[in-house]
Image: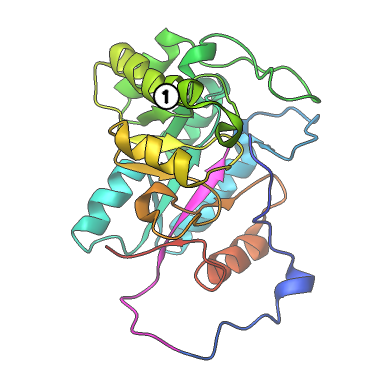
Amino acid sequence: MVADISTASPTAESGTKPPARRTARRGPAAWVAMYHSVSDCPDDPYNVTVSPERLGRQLAWMTGRGLRGVSMRELLAARARGAERGLVGLTFDDGFADFASTALPVLRRWGCTATVFVLPGRLGGVNGWEARGPRKPLLDADGIRRVAATGMEVASHGLTHLDLTRTTDEVLRSEVDGSRRLLTGITGRDVEGFCYPYGYLDERVATAVRRAGYRYACSISPGPAGCGDFALPRIHLGRADTAPRLELKRRLARPFGRAVRAA
């Protein structure tokens, strides 16, 4: 779970202009959508739930504009070839069990792949880090294996959903290295991606993720200077994001630093 600091207000920001200075552009910048739970649950104090119907409409909106939702693994591989045009990264934080039961059928219907960031220290548990709101089940080991078998990317969200900027070095290593080790054992595959719980990171945390062997990490904003692919920005999408809001967020991705830079 993360705070939604990426929501663009059409009233407040429709007149915002990008900086006057222009640079050479390779075409539309790739951007990454950040989801969490996909269900019909109306109790959502953190604005992290989207209904399956709304998710379907959002994917339909992307498809109608010639965009295709893909996992971070696929997006970054395409970027390395200079072929990221027309792709949108789809990420789902926290590893809710409804990813397998509810989100996955919608994604497959629209021909999309996605990355799900899971918590191997809470297998089959619930979202106990949230002070308010309903308790929702998380993926267990079998669920993670089923998701991976469909071609979706399974990546790490740490072990237990801690603010890593506040942990000791020992706990940080356990959360970062330990989660990668456990997920590799569960899936039998290399784990390339990491996602910072709550979107919080600093240079110490980003360095620990890099040293653990990950190839990229997702945050919300770009993070400290020099992080590069270890603080890939994302745009929060929720139940309120209808077509006009999606278009506004897409247009503001580059000027507000929420687009993935070309390699």
> Which residue is rendered at x = 64% and y = 39% of the image?
2
Residue 234 horizontal/vertical position (percent): 52, 52
The picture quadrant where one finds residue 167 is: top right
33 magenta-colored: yes
Residue 212 horizontal/vertical position (percent): 32, 31
Q: Which residue is mark 1?
A: 173
216 magenta-colored: no
> Which residue is rendered at x = 39% and y = 58% of the image?
226
Quadrant where the C terminus sits is bottom left
The picture quadrant where one finds residue 50 is: top right
Which stretch is magenta?
22-35
The picture quadrant where one finds residue 63 is: bottom left
Q: Residue furthest front?
A: 169
Residue 247 horizontal/vertical position (percent): 59, 66
- In depth, the one of 184 and 141 nearer the eye is 184
* Residue 146 at least partly seen: no
10 Å crowding of disc 1: few (<14), some (14-19), many (20+): some
As drawn, 156 above or below 178: below
Q: Residue furthest left?
A: 81
> Which residue is rendered at x = 46% and y = 30% of the image?
117
Quadrant where the N terminus sits is top right
- Tell me the element at label 1: helix
* Residue 253 at least partly seen: yes
As drawn, 166 above or below 135: below
- The answer to whether residue 112 is left or right of residue 250 is left
- The answer to whether residue 107 is left or right of residue 152 is right
Q: Amino acid at mark 1?
A: Arg
- The answer to whether residue 34 is left or right of residue 192 is right
- In depth, the one of 224 and 16 nearer the eye is 224
